């Protein structure tokens, strides 16, 4: 399946890369996922893309080295050519304060990393809805 958009997943854990790739592949979206290991790599990747090549969705881990998810989110929202991209946080943290901080900084949603197939499937369905909205 070929799509005209990408999903950027930013997470420092290779196991989480594998899990996310599996979820997206099961949903028929595996060919559009791009992975980076931290916020600095993600911002560098985005800087090298033409405006029509930017991802439709960015999934950020909250706890990463170099630039964490909140720092990366803040930098994305400060850049006029990137602030329109939908960003969701995907984290092991279920801390309400961190969740609220991310939403206030412009995250569209906040997901606690699922450890069940059902939770992962629900998360991917939400991502599909967000992608559909961004393409309208």
Image (cartoon, grey):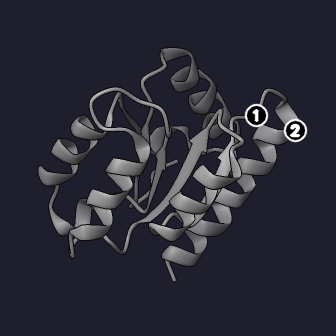
Secondary structure at numbered mark 2? helix
The residue drawn where x is 60% and y is 38% is 91
Seen from the viewer's position, the closer of residues 108 and 71 is 71
Residue positioned 44% across, 66% down in the render: 105
| Quarter of the rendering containing residue 126 | bottom right
Query: Does residue 97 sit above or below 26 in this rendering?
Result: below
Q: Disc 1 versus disc 2: distance between alpha carbons?
A: 8 Å
User: Which residue is at the front of the view, 43 or 4?
Assistant: 43
Callout 1 crowding tier (Cα within 10 Å): few <14, some 14–19, many ≥20: some
Q: Disc 1 designates what residue?
A: 114
Report if the CB atoms under discs 1 and 2 are less than 8 Å apart.
yes
Looking at the image, can residue 8 be seen?
no
SS at badge 1? loop
Residue closest to the far front: 97
Q: Is residue 42 left or right of residue 29?
A: left
Residue 76 location (% of width, % of height): 29, 61
Answer left or right for 19 relative to 57.
Answer: right
Is residue 134 among the parts visible in the rendering?
A: yes
43 vs 135, nearest the viewer: 43
Res 96 label: none
Q: Image point 19% across, 68% down: which residue?
A: 51
* Residue 42: percent from left, percent from top: 27, 42
Q: Quadrant of residue 113?
A: top right
Image position, residue 20 (x, y; %) = 59, 32
At horizontal 35% and vertical 27% (from top left) the residue drawn is 37
Residue 15 in the image: state x and y as whole percent: 56, 16
Q: Quadrant of residue 32?
A: top left
Compared to residue 133, the image places residue 112 above or below, namely above
Relative height, residue 95 to residue 129 (above, below): above
Residue at image mark 2: 118
């Amino acid at each position: 399946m070929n799509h005209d958009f990408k999903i950027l997943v930013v997470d420092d854990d290779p196991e989480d890369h594998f899990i996310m790739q599996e979820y997206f592949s099961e949903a028929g979206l595996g060919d559009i996922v791009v992975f980076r290991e931290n916020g600095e790599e993600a911002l560098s990747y985005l800087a090298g893309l033409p405006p029509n090549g930017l991802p439709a969705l960015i999934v950020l881990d909250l706890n990463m080295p170099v630039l964490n998810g909140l720092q990366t989110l803040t930098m994305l929202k400060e850049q006029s050519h990137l602030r329109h991209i939908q960003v969701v946080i995907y984290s092991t943290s279920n801390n309400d304060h961190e969740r609220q901080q991310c939403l206030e900084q412009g995250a569209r949603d906040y997901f606690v990393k699922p450890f069940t197939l059902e939770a992962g499937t629900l998360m991917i369905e939400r991502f599909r809805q967000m992608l559909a909205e961004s393409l309208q």
